[in-house]
Image: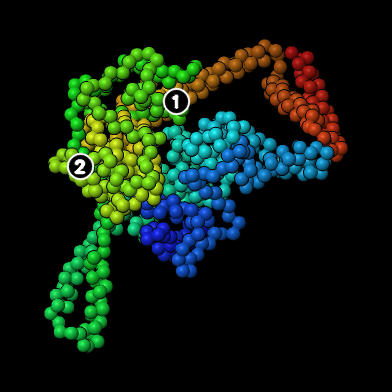
Amino acid sequence: MNYLTLENISKSYGEKTLFSGIDLQIAKGQKIALVARNGSGKSTLLRVISGIEAPEGENAKIELRQGIRVGFLNQDPNFDDKLTILESVFIYAENPKIKAVKEYQEAMLFPEREAKMQEALEVMDDLKAWDFEARVKEMLSKFEIGDFHQEVGSLSGGQQKRLALVQLLIDEPDFLILDEPTNHLDLELIEWLEEYLQRSSLTLFMVTHDRYFLERVCDHIIELDQGVLYRYRGNYSDFLEKKAVREENEAIDLDKSKKLYKKELNWIRRMPQARGTKAKSRVTKFETIKENAHKNKNEDKVQIEVKGRRLGSKILEAQYISKSYGDKKIVDNFFYKFNSGEKVGIAGPNGVGKTTFLKLLTQEIRPDGGKIIIGDTIVFGYYTQAGINLKQDKRVIDVIRDIAEYLPLAKGKLTAAALLERFLFSRKQQQVFVSQLSGGEKRRLYLLTVIMENPNFLILDEPTNDLDILTLNVLEEFLFEFNGCLIVVSHDRYFMDKIVDHLFIFEGDGKIKDYLGNYSEYRASRKAKLLEEQRSKRENRKSIEKSQKQIEVKKAESQGLSRDDKKEVKRLEKQIEKLEEEKNKIIASFNQPDLSPEKIETLSKTLAEVKDQLEEKEMRWMELADQT
């Protein structure tokens, strides 16, 4: 069953064509990811599919299956700033349970309208929606949004992105369209979302650079390359394998076309003016061969060959530093001495103080206690989450020339323009203004400005957000070969696993644990520890229950009841307990405001029946008790 069909879809901005004449089908239950380099039109295609932007192209067609509810997570959510967090979740949702809660809340404002109230109560009962608001609050808390009555306008961009994701998941649409869903989530939330999206009932189309998501969640990957869609069945590793085969075949075809082109070119030059039909046909065919032979096979790769600065014997020492804000401890008596060439990853939930810790190391802020000692040869390169303050009215080439005209390499030097080309900014694109770049292209440019300073101590705070997989792969290779020191804060598990030697784990309350290994190893050891703790608790509970049963058996034996009587006593005690609970619930129901007469009559009859049963069970239990 097809949920979505695209036919002959095109999109351009000015002279730049993002894609042309593409077709796409998405069937129920499929989990598809779209991968492409930054600026290729990934987010634009998602907005076209979701109906935010209109497609271009003659006979362009977008067909969504009737009755399908679509949920779209935009990179830049659009909320009413005056609404509270809780209002924002409820006001836009289409989920029947959310609608029922909204209608019930409205009915509560006008208790005199009995018919409206009765209808709302029945819908709430039918949908079992009584605990739905509590579930919404639980989900908001899970995504680190605590003050439900806070106005949305006061939230940060990251908080608004998490709120939009909560709103989407609560709404439970049939078809999810997600643009970078893991941005602004900590590692534990990313793993939770990964498990959630693996559910077979979900249909998914998303853009993400998280390669573990691509590996574990997706069953199809679509690549947008130079305006053409290529579809691969399978996950990320299948995609890499099949893409390599495709590119190898294309290279073979290109080589054949070039050889044929040379042969045909020689024939064209030797022959007299074409007069016959066959000769004219061959000339026409030659033009096609020429076009195939001169296809621009894009082999661009980000190449980073910056000459590293020398590191002295003294690098950086954190000597028992502490930092707090009010009652909240960020760092508590932390000591560490960095060695040459080590690569450290930092992991911990959002808000625990990772960015503050980096600012302490670079002496941007001072510790409350202890001190930071930095070696004389250290030159920091600091890529920050909030550091993309590129001037929007400057051309790309001027941004780089403002730093330096040339960059020293391991061998020779490189001009600013040539360096930009290695970072996938063509000569033509170097002349565009920064304001015209996509979010990922701006991050790539910002990363280049940091590396151009030729640092020997790199600090990267969330460098992977909005970067395409091509750039990430080459950045990883550069960092792998980087001879200086490196500290990385990242929610990209694949990136962390590939780069770091050990981790600083922020456990909260100022405690920082040094873990020797990568993130996946840490999570595996932590999971094993939690499973062992749970197993131990289960065994202790079973031991206690066994002891209690033995005591009960001995007690019953001493009381002189038969075996069948003992079983009946236990059965009666359970029945009496359940009837008591039922009676209390019915009594509590009478406290509901403005109960209708019919409802009161029904509750009264049910309560009388429960009391009769309870009295009967209690009488029998007392008979047995008298025999002891």
Horizontal placement of 367 versus 179: left or right? left
Q: Amino acid at mark 1?
A: Val
Residue 520: percent from left, percent from top: 36, 33
Residue 158: percent from left, percent from top: 48, 37
Residue identified by numbered label 1: 352
Please tell me whether residue 282 is drawn above or below residue 186 in the rendered image. Answer: below
Residue 418: percent from left, percent from top: 22, 48
Q: Residue at x 39, y 28 (%)?
A: 355
Horizontal placement of 601 versus 488: left or right? right
Quadrant containing the C terminus is: top right
CB-based contact (under 8 Å), mark 2 and mark 1: no
Q: Nearer the viewer, residue 278 or 129?
A: 278
The quadrant in which residue 404 appears is top left
Numbered circle sitting on residue 274: none
Residue identified by numbered label 2: 406
Please tell me whether residue 285 is drawn above or below residue 295 in the rendered image. Answer: below
Secondary structure of the residue carrying numbered label 2 = strand
Q: Residue at x 29, y 35 (%)?
A: 499
Q: Nearer the viewer, residue 25 or 492?
A: 492
- Circle nearer the N terminus (2, 1): 1
The quadrant in which residue 311 appears is top left
| Cα separation between marks 2 and 1 | 40 Å
Please tell me whether residue 33 is drawn above or below residue 20 in the rendered image. Answer: above
- Residue 303 seen in render: no
